């Protein structure tokens, strides 16, 4: 009998009915499509509901938020903090603890492998709403107890002041919210970052824009640093503009492998591009494959491992960490060019824009 609390990314479960939130539904979908997603599992919203239904927690949260006025910033922050304390101080129910521990051990290395623990809310990463960055993510978490603590903090992040205000502004009710959590093997990244399949500066859908950093990509995602930037032609998959930034620090695993540290980048590497040309092409190909699968512009996170073997065709192996719809330019109406009948341009373009399967 399948466990109601965990779903592995490679299980073949239907993302539409798996109760794993938007982010993990995407990881299930992409894994099932053969895209290179690291091993992992989702803790379902059923596990979240078990917590809320234990010891009257749901009623306590409702009482703490009754009559909330999000225009009162100080009051909202105080109530949000009170709710988060209610959640983090509750023990994880024993059947959920057992399910998480078993699934974590199933990722390998005897249950001591570094993982990323990511929030995956039911209302997250929708085509018309983006909660990106509003819920918690914890990187390089090791050991079952640490994973369970990170899960609890992800659950609690559903009630930050920022999230409460955003839901109120967009008409998302507080009742009936669900939070799943994704647990995914960490990639010990030599380089990592993001890629958008539309140019964020002007909405040009013929370009892919890649931002890259040495080490893990969290400083890029959070905006803590100025990354290297590559503007790539979406048809040719070749860079048309490269901007290399000075890199003073990189986020990497400590020598003992237990925690992450910010390590100074030696002078010789500070102004060297993070990515080789073949890596730029591989990341662009991956981003294009994700866009093709979903049929709309995407914002993906990627990583290249330090010790990752190349693909069978000797191209770089790039891991897909997550993907979400691009929500700025995608909402704007597209202008279409008129093609003169018989000119043959449309058939040539259709051929060039075609994309085969992504190698795994």
Image (cartoon, helix red, strand yellow):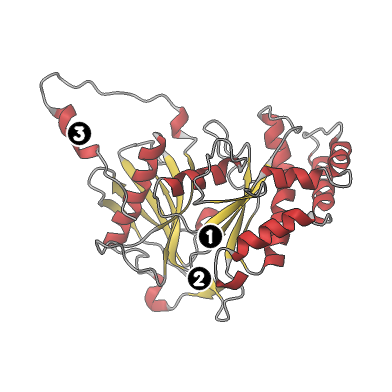
x%, y% of residue 215? 47, 67
Mark 2 or mark 3: name the one nearer the start of the chain: 2
Q: Between 193 and 61, which is closer to the camera in this rendering?
A: 61
Question: Could you say which is closer to the camera, residue 246 or residue 107?
Answer: 107
Q: Which residue is mark 1?
A: 219
Q: Looking at the picture, tell me which residue is in the foreground, 27 or 172.
A: 27
- Identify the residue shown where x is 77% and y is 33%: 71
Cα–Cα gap, marks 2 and 1: 10 Å
Q: Which mark is residue 349?
A: 3
Q: Residue farthest to the front? A: 1
Q: Residue at x 69, y 52 (%)?
A: 154
Please determine whether, in this image, residue 210 is positioned above or below residue 16: below
Per the image, label 2 sits on a secondary structure element best described as strand
Q: Which mark sits nearer the N-terminus, 2 or 1? A: 1
- Label 1 near label 2: C-beta < 8 Å? yes
- Is 66 situated left or right of 324 in this image? right
Residue where numbered disc 2 is placed: 249
Residue ID at (50%, 70%): 249
Q: Quadrant of residue 332?
A: top left
The location of residue 103, given as percent across then percent down, is: 62, 59
Quarter-of-image position of residue 192: bottom left
**Residue at coordinates 37% horizontally, 25% vertically from top-left?**
334
Q: Is residue 182 above or below residue 69?
A: below
Q: Is residue 198 above or below residue 96?
A: above
10 Å crowding of disc 2: few (<14), some (14-19), many (20+): some
Quadrant of residue 193 in the image?
A: bottom left
Label pair 2/3, CB-CB below 8 angstroms:
no
Q: Secondary structure at mark 1?
A: helix
Instruction: Give residue 307's mark.
Output: none
């Amino acid at each position: 009998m399948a466990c109601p609390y965990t779903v592995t990314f490679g299980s073949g479960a239907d993302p539409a009915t798996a109760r794993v939130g938007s982010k993990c539904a995407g990881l299930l979908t992409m894994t099932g499509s053969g895209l290179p997603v690291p091993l992992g599992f989702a803790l379902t919203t059923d596990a979240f509901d078990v917590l809320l239904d234990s010891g009257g927690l749901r009623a306590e949260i409702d009482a703490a938020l009754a009559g909330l006025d999000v225009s009162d910033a100080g009051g909202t922050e105080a109530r949000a903090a009170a709710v988060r304390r209610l959640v983090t101080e509750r023990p994880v129910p024993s059947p959920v603890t057992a399910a998480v521990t078993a699934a974590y051990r199933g990722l390998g290395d005897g249950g001591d492998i570094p993982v990323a623990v990511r929030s995956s809310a039911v209302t997250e990463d929708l085509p018309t709403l983006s909660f990106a960055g509003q819920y918690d993510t914890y990187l390089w978490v090791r050991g079952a107890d640490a994973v369970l603590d990170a899960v609890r903090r992800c659950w609690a992040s559903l009630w930050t002041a920022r999230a409460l205000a955003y839901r109120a502004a967009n008409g998302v009710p507080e009742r009936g919210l669900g939070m799943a959590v994704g647990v995914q093997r960490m990639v010990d990244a030599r380089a990592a970052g993001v890629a958008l399949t539309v140019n964020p500066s002007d909405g040009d859908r013929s370009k892919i824009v890649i931002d890259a950093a040495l080490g893990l990509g969290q400083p890029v995602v959070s905006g803590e640093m100025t990354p290297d930037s590559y503007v790539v032609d979406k048809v040719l998959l070749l860079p048309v503009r490269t901007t290399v930034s000075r890199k003073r620090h990189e986020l990497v695993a400590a020598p003992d492998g237990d925690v992450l540290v910010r390590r100074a980048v030696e002078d010789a590497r500070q102004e060297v591009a993070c990515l080789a040309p073949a890596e730029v092409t591989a990341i662009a190909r991956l981003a294009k494959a994700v866009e093709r699968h979903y049929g709309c512009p995407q914002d993906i996170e990627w990583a290249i491992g330090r010790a990752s073997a190349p693909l069978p065709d000797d191209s770089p192996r790039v891991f897909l960490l997550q993907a979400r719809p691009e929500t700025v330019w995608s909402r704007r109406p597209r202008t279409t060019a008129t093609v003169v009948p018989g000119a043959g341009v449309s058939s040539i373009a259709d051929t060039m824009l075609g994309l085969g399967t992504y190698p795994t």
